[in-house]
Amino acid sequence: MLRVSTVLYIMILVVLLAVAAVASATPTIPRAAQAMYNPKLFQGDIMGIAGQEPGHERAAILGDEYLWSGGVVPYIFGPSVDSYQKSVILAGMSDFHDRTCIRFIERTTQANYLEIVTNDSGCWSYVGTIGGMQRLSLDTNGCIYKGTAIHELMHAIGFYHEHCRNDRDDYVTIHYENVQDGYAYAFDKDTYWRYVGENYNYASIMHYGTYAFSVNWGVAETIVPTDPNVILVEAYDKDHMEQSDANQINNLYASECARRK
């Protein structure tokens, strides 16, 4: 006959094995995705928007007064940024230089500039130039990817998310029943949208993936394309912006970049 202590041990072991089985069956959200989903930030990775009251942000490509003068974006790296992290971020900047008229330059005395840091929490940016120094966070834990850097830098020059365009319902279905509590606002459609010359692009560097903000990553889809042949890819898994992204940047900044010549 088994002793009480032995029976108790067996019961505890069975419970632990059951918990482990459940945990192993539930996919874990990749840190690179989780770092983009910051509580209380607009659409998950936007700290604030030039010209809009904090807490009352609305999605829209910015007015010209909030664009970077001459299409030039001065920046500095915070002391937390190491040489490898700099190389990844600079590679992201090079994508803008290769495809658009935007130029990122090291700050000297410019009043408006980006401070890029890696010791803050999550991946996030302000949208457009807010005046003075504005921080852009690429957390060392989850954000050091070329695609993520391009995504956040594109926010900084005035762009929002592709899947929040006001015409998105023609291209994707948002399954709110699969979205984590408190994150439904991250899928609010852009009702103030400004067209800058390109149609919806599933592959845009500004488009989130299939399981964005999902209650069950890898299982419960939140963004489902109306085209069954499309596979959505997260920004961190992309190596460059799409040509449509570049075209929109060049269209938005045409007047500013022309002033630089």
Image (cartoon, grey):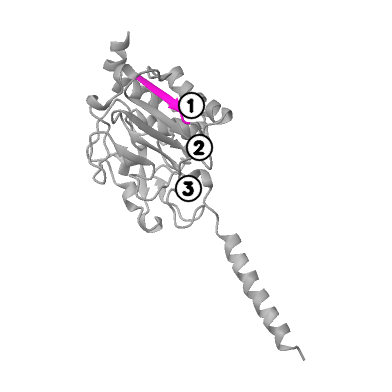
Cα distance, mark 1 to mark 3? 20 Å
The vertical placement of 83 against 227, above or below, is: above
Secondary structure of residue under mark 3: helix
Quarter of image, res 127: top left
Q: Tag 3: residue type?
A: Gln
| Residue extending furthest toward the right | 1
Residue 248 forms part of the magenta stretch: no
> Which residue is depicted at the point 58% across and 29% down?
84
Cα distance, mark 2 to mark 3? 11 Å
Q: Nearer the viewer, residue 6 or 233?
A: 6
Q: Tag 1: residue type?
A: Gly
Asked if the residues shown at circle 2 and circle 3 are in contact, with their CB atoms under 8 angstroms apart, the answer is no
Residue wearing tag 1 = 92
Q: Tag 2: residue type?
A: Tyr
Cα distance, mark 2 to mark 1? 11 Å
The vertical placement of 235 against 87, above or below, is: below
Name the N-terminal-most of marks 1 and 3.
3
In this picture, which residue range is highlighted in magenta? Answer: 72-78
- Say which quadrant the C terminus sits in: top left
